[in-house]
Image: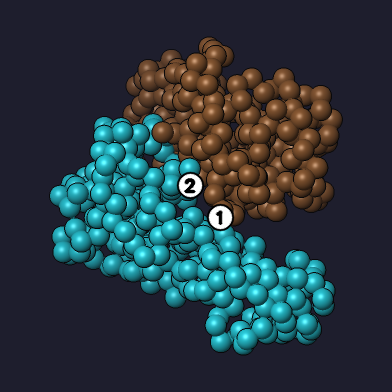
Chain colours: A cyan, B brown
Amino acid sequence: MNCILLPAKNIVHETAQINTLLQVRHVTQILDAKVGESLKIGQIGGQLGTAIIESITQDCIQLRDVQLTIAPPPKLDLTVILALPRPKVLRRLIMDMTALGVRHIILINSYRTQKSYWQSPMLERLDEFVLEGLQQSVDTIAPSIDLKKRFKPFVEDELANLVTNGAIVAHPYSTQSFAQYIKKQPLDKPYLDHPDLKKPPVSGLPSLVCIGAEGGWIDYEIALLATQGCEPVHIGPRILRTEAAVNALLGQWLL
Amino acid sequence: MNCILLPAKNIVHETAQINTLLQVRHVTQILDAKVGESLKIGQIGGQLGTAIIESITQDCIQLRDVQLTIAPPPKLDLTVILALPRPKVLRRLIMDMTALGVRHIILINSYRTQKSYWQSPMLERLDEFVLEGLQQSVDTIAPSIDLKKRFKPFVEDELANLVTNGAIVAHPYSTQSFAQYIKKQPLDKPYLDHPDLKKPPVSGLPSLVCIGAEGGWIDYEIALLATQGCEPVHIGPRILRTEAAVNALLGQWLL
């Protein structure tokens, strides 16, 4: 937690209240902060800033001199379509994609997604994982998250509308590398403006990335994604864990 | 496990033996492979290839027609110096750095590394995590791993010898971005040849990267690393988990 994010209702003029157990414990036990000290805080969906600790009890911290004047970092012009992974790795994947600044996350079914994953209680906790990712990366704006339980109707009927500025599907067995994909993009590619983007995307990077679960996509899925404009690309001969692959691939957007 | 790696002693002419419980279970339970089917295998430190399952018992699988003719993927020309992280994330970090193809890993002490981490039983299991990373990424060559319990003597006396082709230290509060660092490298930078590297490194990327544990490096550490040629760089305003940061940063070497 590199900042404490609070909902708007907890902030009134220049005072605020931290009243979730996890956050109170973080301030008192991890940060070991005392009355009178300054904390990094932010308003969910709003600005970042600081506040001074007014009082501490076991389940509530009162803040004064709340100053929220810093804009959150820009989001990436990026939608990630992720085959629903094992529940155990879902938390870290949502946290990491949020922390990296992905604007829109779509969890979809795939041949190698086990049906039981869709019944996981972890799917009820996505907001919690998003908050963890925002507090990790010092951001306040949550990505939007959609769940699509049926692969074919989603790809055939909805995907094309999302492919605005180039799209790739990560596939270790593709003949085209991601570097080759980037190089062949025209430099004057039109940039679709978004009101909440602070700067244009890095030239050549697509605005949509599809990433498979463990075991990747099957040929049928790769072919169907390709019909909607998603070009298969690899990032070298090495096969990475889904978590590692997501971060290694999306790391390209950070430079 | 995208391939099964065996020590040289388990391979005799065109026959081989899988006799570790984890690997036997992977073949029988995850892959659900039967007698007569082909398996992807490799020899630790050697070549990759295939073999046919001759027989299966509860604790041993006999293989025939072993053909190891494929060279492992090239290593990255990269040494990673990592502040020893929490034991819980150490396994995944060693796995991921191995899978990404890092040639040399040095785990060092830092101000924010808790002393107890050096007593963790996980440090006895590094070979196991390396094997997991190799089997994940279909590689056979283990990275070398060194443990350096004393930061200052290591940095002052040993680090300079390792800085052969540029060095950076990841630091979210640096004024220089990694992209700026890469752009300022001369294009004709001499390339130090290694006999086991199949291709030259991507131009501008350093051959040594220092990455802190949770909480990053303190100013003293950044300053001491800088005296030995490690330039502080950031990868944007977002602070990532150590695991995510390692993959996002090292992902640059994959393109």
Residue plotted at (77% across, 50% down): B112
Q: Are marks 2 and 1 on the same chain?
A: no
Viewed as shown, does residue A21 lie left or right of A131? right
Expressed as whole percent of the image width and height from the top left, the position of residue A13 reads 63, 86
Label 2 to label 1, Cα distance in Å?
A: 9 Å
Three-letter amino acid code at the position of disc 2: Leu
In the rendered image of this protein, does residue A29 appear above or below residue B131? below
Density class for disc 2 (Cα within 10 Å; few <14, some 14-19, many ≥20) is many
- Residue carrying label 2: A254
- Residue carrying label 1: B238
Residue plotted at (77% across, 73% down): A28
Three-letter amino acid code at the position of disc 1: Arg
Expressed as whole percent of the image width and height from the top left, the position of residue B103 reads 58, 27
Residue plotted at (53% across, 41% down): B249
Viewed as shown, does residue A214 lie left or right of A95? left
Evaluate whether residue B28 shows in this view: no
Density class for disc 1 (Cα within 10 Å; few <14, some 14-19, many ≥20) is many
Check whether the beta carbons of the residues at disc 2 and disc 1 lie within 8 A of each other.
Answer: yes
